[in-house]
Amino acid sequence: MSMSLDDSPIEAEEVAGIRGALLRYRVMAWLVGVLLVVLVVVGMPLKYFGDNDAVVVATGVPHGWLYMVLLITAYDLGRRVRWPWMRLILIALAGTIPFLSFVAEHYATKDVRTRLDAVRA
């Protein structure tokens, strides 16, 4: 019986690397999420209704660059915990929809912590 990537167990020596990858992913998910919310909720209305694009300029480019870093950290974490590609794609898409990166981060953290708890047991 072959084991899918999602079902393969995490070895004890992988735990420290997974914890580091989880922390990096969580920080990036929150940074990208906050910047996107500020961009969409504050910046876009100011730009289109107030003719002031300062917030869009200040948050748009950093959000784009940090989104790329989020993709890298999500891939690194997903590779370490052996997530299926569909989960990684959904996490990547979550960084493009306001507030969804927070939801994705919550469920990703819950999943990783459950997997790490299984290693301890």
Image (tube, rainbow, N blue to C red):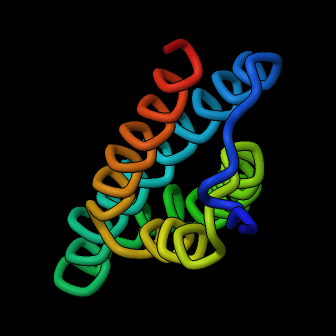
**Is the residue 55 above or below the residue 26 in the image?**
below
Q: Position of residue 56 (x, y in %)?
A: 44, 68
**Residue located at (48% from left, 74% from top):** 90
Residue toward you, 64 or 59: 64
| Residue that extends furthest to the bottom in the rendered view of this protein | 48
Q: Quadrant of residue 53?
A: bottom left
- Specify the farthest residue to the right: 13
Q: Nearer the viewer, residue 109 or 115?
A: 115
53 left or right of 12?
A: left
Which quadrant of the structure image shows residue 39?
A: bottom left
- Viewer-closest of 26 and 55: 26
Task: Residue 70: give x, y in percent of width and height.
Answer: 64, 54
In this rendering, is residue 109 above or below 75?
Answer: above
Q: Residue at 65% across / 75% down in the picture?
A: 85
Q: Quadrant of the N terminus?
A: bottom right
In the depicted view, which residue is nearer to us: 27 or 42?
27
Residue 106: quarter of image = top left
Q: Position of residue 48 (x, y in %)?
A: 26, 86
User: Which residue is at a point 76% across and 27% down the rendered structure image?
Assistant: 11
Which residue is drawn at the image coordinates 69% and 29% (left, top)? 18
- Residue 96 x, y percent position in the rendering: 45, 74
**Residue 94 shown left or right of residue 75 in the figure:** left
Q: How many marks?
A: 0
27 with respect to 48 (left or right): right
